[in-house]
Image: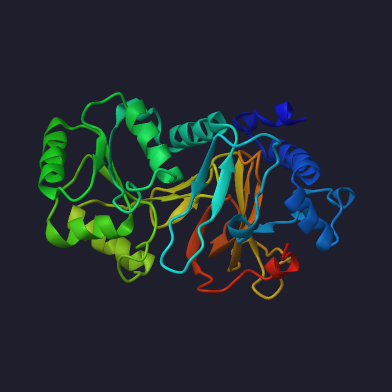
């Protein structure tokens, strides 16, 4: 049955998405003992799931406390999330790296076209010291995929980065500067830029390095300092194999094999209508070998055309339902 789930990237309609999601749920209910135990404890049997909205979403904290495998052999790699002191890192055992590579390559191409048209520069200082970061794995792969000597990682050598961007701007070269928020903010505070051919793409918060900013204020600061019309964003996480992207105003779009829904803040099993604020539930059909149906700790709003925005997080709070399984 697993082989029939590998072609998630061929999905291009709502009907195909629903059919594929139901098949993947049945497979993971059968193969993933942790996910099945969770479904059993909330009294959902595979026979009860007739449409996508019937599928249970596993609280994301289970990636910190349980091994979520839908595959019998040892994983090819275990990705771990970043964490601050006292936190427990999430772990995502990935058995088939080709699924991850296919997802992020085709996801990028879906929104930005051919990666070879770009120079990719990365500011990921809090991640580069780790060899288990899914973000570094993805970025390193995409840097190599550009086939351009100018692409690469930068730490704190701002003079070299400034010189590189100046050269690329003079050449009219399309460039992406991808970075964590605190690193991009450092560049915004210490330099004045005038970038006309460069996309500034932030990929998350301050990672404990600085005080968190409201997204709109952060983007306005970055826009003003880098001289760009919009700030792009990448939305991904250790527990997923797919990414959503925002090209303007903090509104994200998903690739065809990914969906976002909202749930009630009062009842975690109640899904909300579009444009209502709630917790974000994510379906990632590339997550074949772990769990594709995840209740995140992000707060947001979903629109009728599958766009969504992230409004905040459940700060220091566990998603209700996690205490059902203290295995």
Q: How is the image coloured?
A: rainbow
Observer-nearest residue: 132 or 26?
132
Reply above or below: 85 against 235.
Answer: below
Image quadrant containing the C terminus: bottom right
Reply above or below: 225 against 321.
Answer: above
Q: How many marks?
A: 0
Q: Is residue 41 left or right of residue 155?
A: right
Q: Position of residue 140 (x, y in %)?
A: 36, 35
Q: Quadrant of residue 37?
A: bottom right
Q: Position of residue 267 (x, y in %)?
A: 72, 72
> Residue at position x 84%, y 48% from top?
50
Q: Is residue 170 left or right of residue 15?
A: left
Q: Position of residue 170 (x, y in %)?
A: 11, 34
> Residue at position x 12%, y 42% from top?
160
> Residue at position x 36%, y 27% from top?
145
> Residue at position x 58%, y 50% from top?
306
Observer-nearest residue: 155 or 272?
155
Q: Is residue 49 left or right of residue 140?
A: right
Q: Residue furthest top?
A: 147
Image quadrant containing the N terminus: top right
Reply above or below: 69 against 174.
Answer: below
Observer-nearest residue: 28 or 34?
34
Q: Is residue 45 left or right of residue 87?
A: right
Q: Position of residue 51 (x, y in %)?
A: 79, 48
């Amino acid at each position: 049955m697993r082989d029939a789930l590998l072609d998630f990237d061929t999905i291009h309609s709502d009907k195909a998405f629903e059919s594929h999601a139901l098949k993947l749920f049945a497979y993971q209910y059968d193969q993933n003992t942790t996910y099945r135990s969770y479904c059993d404890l909330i009294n959902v049997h595979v026979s009860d799931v007739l449409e996508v909205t019937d599928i249970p979403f596993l609280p994301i904290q289970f990636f910190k406390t349980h091994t979520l495998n839908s595959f019998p052999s040892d994983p090819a790699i275990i990705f771990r999330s970043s964490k601050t002191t006292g936190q427990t890192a999430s772990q995502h055992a990935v058995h088939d790296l080709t699924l991850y590579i296919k997802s992020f390559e085709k996801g990028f191409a879906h929104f930005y076209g051919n990666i070879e048209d770009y120079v990719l520069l990365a500011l990921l200082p809090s991640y580069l010291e780790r060899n288990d970061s899914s973000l570094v794995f993805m970025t390193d792969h995409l840097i190599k995929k550009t086939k351009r000597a100018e692409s690469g990682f930068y730490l704190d050598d701002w003079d070299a980065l400034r010189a590189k961007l100046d050269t690329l701007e003079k050449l009219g070269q399309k460039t992406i500067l991808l970075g964590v928020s605190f690193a991009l903010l450092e560049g915004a505070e210490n330099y004045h830029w005038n970038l006309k051919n460069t996309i500034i793409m932030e990929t998350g918060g301050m990672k404990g390095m600085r005080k968190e900013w409201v997204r709109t204020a952060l983007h306005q600061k970055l826009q003003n300092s880098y001289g760009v019309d919009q700030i792009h964003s990448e939305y991904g996480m250790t527990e997923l194999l797919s990414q959503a992207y925002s090209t303007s105003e903090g509104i994200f779009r998903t690739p065809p094999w990914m969906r976002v829904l909202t749930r009630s803040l009062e009842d975690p099993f109640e899904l909300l209508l579009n444009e209502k604020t709630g917790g974000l539930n994510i379906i990632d059909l590339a997550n074949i070998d772990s769990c594709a149906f995840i209740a995140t700790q992000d707060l947001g709003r979903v629109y009728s055309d599958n766009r969504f925005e992230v409004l905040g997080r459940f700060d220091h709070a566990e998603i209700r339902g996690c205490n059902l399984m203290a295995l």
